[in-house]
Amino acid sequence: MKIETRPEQFKEHSFVGVFLRKLHLDIPLLMALILLLVLSFMMLYSSSGKDWGLLTRQANRVGFAMVLMVILAHINPRQFQRFSIGLYLMGVGFLIAVLVVGDVGKGAQRWLYIGFRFQPSEMIKLTTPMMVAWYLSGHELPPRWRHIAVATALILLPTILIVRQPDLGTSLLVASSGMSVLYFSGISWRFLTGVISALSIFAPVYWQFFMREYQKDRVTTFLNPEADPLGKGYHIIQSKIAIGSGGEYGKGWQENTQSHLEFLPESSTDFIFAVFAEEFGLMGCLCLLSLYLFIIVRGFYIAVQAQDTYGRLLAGSLVCTFFVYVFVNIGMVIGILPVVGVPLPLISYGGTSMVTLFAGFGMLMSIHTHKKILPS
Amino acid sequence: MRRHQTVKDVRNRFLENRIFLNRIVVLFFFILVLITGLIMRLVYLQIEGHSKYKNMATHNRIKVMAIPPTRGIIYDRKGHVLAENLPSYNLEVIPEQVDDLDETLARLQQLLTIPAEKIAAFRKQVRRYKRFSSVPLLLQLSDEDVARFAVHRHTFKGVDIQARLIRHYPYKDLTAHVVGYLGRINDRELKVLSKEDYRGIHSIGKVGLERSYETTLRGTSGYAEIETNAQGRPINELEKINSIPGDDIYLTLDIDLQKIAYDALGDYNGAVVALEISTGGVLVQASKASFDPNLFVSGISYADYAALNDSKNMPLFDRVLRGQYPPGSTLKPFVGLAGLEHNITTFQETLFCPGFYQLPKKEHKYRDWKKWGHGHVNLDKAIIESCDVYFYDMALALGIDKLSHFLKKFGFGAKTGIDLKGEKAGLMPSREWKREHRKKGWYPGETLITGIGQGFTQVTPMQLARATATLANKGQVVTPYLAEHIELADKKQVLAHAEPENLNLMPENVAYINEAMMHVVHSSKGTARRIAKDIDYKIAGKTGTAQVYSIKQNESYNEDEIEFNMRDHALFIAFAPVDNPKIAVAVIVEHGSHGGSVAAPIAAKVMKQYLAEVAY
């Protein structure tokens, strides 16, 4: 039996091929990520008004995130599997600690000091699908009822803890990362439709009893932004003006007016897509969406190629979460989803989501590059 | 069996693979549908709506401009303005509208003589302001400068003169520590302030009442919806939500009395505090040396600040709330009261004072200020003549634990709780304190000197005044405060003040101490007898001197031989009238040497002026 590590797409003797294989990196994925990062820095340069300090800070974060990606890509997925439960428990522990002793930032408790400021809800975005994948891969698939029940509890625990912080955007991502594992594990369609209808019944109850005032505001604003044009609807209206005025081909790089004149708020973070759409127009948006779609396709390819259940479930979930990121952010910026604080992946300014995303891609590459060829 | 298992495994794996692939394909199509939805929406916005949104973006730029509120005015108890807003002509620049900023600034410098540090400060400010907003370069232009600029105005694009309101303190150094001042919001403050609350506001209360009552005085920003052209210049105002001015604050402070106290300090540095006895309202809170707070409002120059900071008179130092002095003999009435309350002594009991005191079996002589002694003294005489030996003995009999505990009840060693931030707590030493902070046990000799207000004990002038008011109040502890009520338009709101706390002292004991203090002023041997002239009411007081320089065993204190800054601090506490107390005063004169001749007359002037206006 011949045992060989992949990726197989590099020629055996090419220097670059050997080097990258040693690094366990997936070239197509890496290229797409680098392309997005280039776009990100172009956008930040433009939206921040050439703020070199901001760019340097972001470059440091991206550097850190990429190092983390390389390290994770190096680790055998079996190690992820082994440490799933430990990391999950640690993450949940941190979340509880945040609620008890956390740092309050912008009216919500999200931060924890452990030598440095640390946001445990980011870590749980990865450890929740890891845990659920570990749990389900230990049993026969499709899962039985009680396995589904346990998996659901494993997802709900961190989700509820994050809702309590309160951070709706992140809890949404954590929930979807966990639920996607369940979806991939092959639970029946009947069950899925049942859950979706149950959720739609639960939504009004949640609205009534669990949502904070500012979260309700965001949703009502989303439904009718013109009702409060100077206050809370301002974000969405300005965002739509910026995007719409971009037209087919956009105004050109650095030629945006809406964020330069300070009409568009949060133009480097959550609303950076509006700046992008204004400068590069519909064509630019289509290119960006294609780039995202390419990453998703490549991710799904990796998932399908994965050799064990754990790797497959985890890879599928990571890709699915990445899509949720893209969809929720763009959806809110173009005004078809309520404003929840989710950044545009790999483009928005900010360190925490960047680190989580690259860690996810690192794991994806690890799953793809640590394979044994099975006898056919 | 084994074989069967393997077959099942393989079948499951196959099934699993098939299901997984199936799920991926379904999800992928779902994702494609959602992405198509995003694209359709983008097409709707960017193709269908393009001309509409382009129009909105280029012609109808709606901008929200903040309208800063007018800051509340601070009045004294009689309605004199202590902090107001005056119109000021500022030279302001909109950097985005200037073609060549460096060249423009250079030309402005030639025209108006602008110091280089103002230019540097301006460049720093530019980064903090929103784009297309007017950044101040020079504040409070003289009429001459306004005229000079007006002539050349057309040559300076993006530069203009703006009429703004600027904070002004008409009483200058008189109120610098109490009222405090307003200054530019700095980077550190910027990080913690809510952007919403400070829309269009660039200043914040830095010290004094301006800081402590920042939220009351500030008011609420409004905003205007402004239509601007493509360059961001305002063309039309669409809608306006007016700002709400901050509340005016009326103080208990009496600026006339404050001036009398401040002037009475003369060339000395020191502090004068006067409290309204029944309420704890602060009538006088003077700290000298002082400074002109108006310097800070428009941004103090480095040279001015360095001069204030380096001055040996320490004008920036608030002596009333942050100055911590040994109370000296002014502590004796309280120590005496402790003796009475703990039944250590009686009204009649006497002790012989030979001019020094020795602990049993110890060589060291604890001196009395009067070398040859006071002879036989009871508590009354001990307070009148300020006999140290008597209080050495009493302190030793009480012990540090009881003494410290009793004095703390009068507020020594704790913040008074006045409505100003930054107050110091002073120090009332105890066995526990010394063990914790000095890592040493308590010595009996330290109990002795604590009994005459020396040693570790430190008090702020405010604490001393409050303790004096407590004696006058027969054991009711009041919490001092400055802000009486706030007012906005027709709304008047009296602020809540802490209820007095009753120490439950024996009335005859307090009466005895108060009478002894009256004898300090109104008897032939009293240490403050010279202030008893020309008044038709009775004052109770106690003089004190606090050592700055310690005298060695075989030396004697000779005022003329030592340098000024080594001389003792002079203290005096008093209240009046004795039979119906209205005002309590504490005076500390740094290096004033004599409580009776230097500090007491200052207190007397304040009380005389106050009682001339108040019925008693």
Image (cartoon, rainbow, N blue to C red):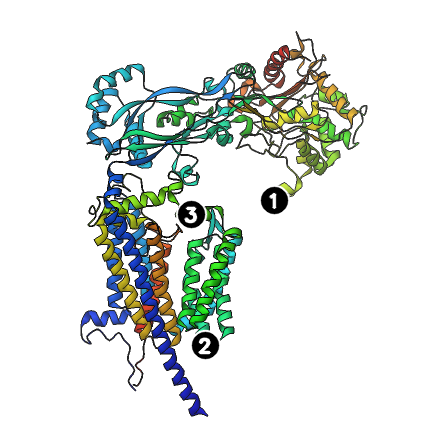
Q: Look at label 2 and name its amino acid.
A: Gly
Give the labeled residue for mark 3: A218
Packing grade of label 3 (10 A; few <14, some 14-19, many >=20) is some
Q: Are marks 1 and 3 on the same chain?
A: no
Packing grade of label 2 (10 A; few <14, some 14-19, many >=20) is few
**A131 lies above or below B121:** below
Q: Are marks 3 and 2 on the same chain?
A: yes
Q: Kindly identify the residue that appears in the image at 43 percent across and 39 percent down.
A: B194
Q: Is residue B102 left or right of residue B23?
A: left
Task: Spot the residue most to the top.
Answer: B534
Q: Chain of mark 1?
A: B
- Per the image, label 2 sits on a secondary structure element best described as loop
How far apart in space, not on screen, are marks 3 and 2 (Cα)?
41 Å
Task: Estimate the x, y position of residue B35 in percent, counting from the top left.
Answer: 30, 59
The one of B73 and B36 positioned closer to us in this rendering? B36
Task: Estimate the x, y position of residue B282 in percent, counting from the top left.
Answer: 59, 23
Task: Estimate the x, y position of residue A228 in percent, counting from the top left.
Answer: 40, 40
Q: Chain of mark 2?
A: A
Of badges 3 and 2, nearer the viewer stands: 3
Image quadrant occupied by the N terminus of chain A = bottom left
Give the labeled residue for mark 2: A138
Q: Chain of mark 3?
A: A
Q: Which mark, residue B436?
A: 1
Camera sees residue B373: no
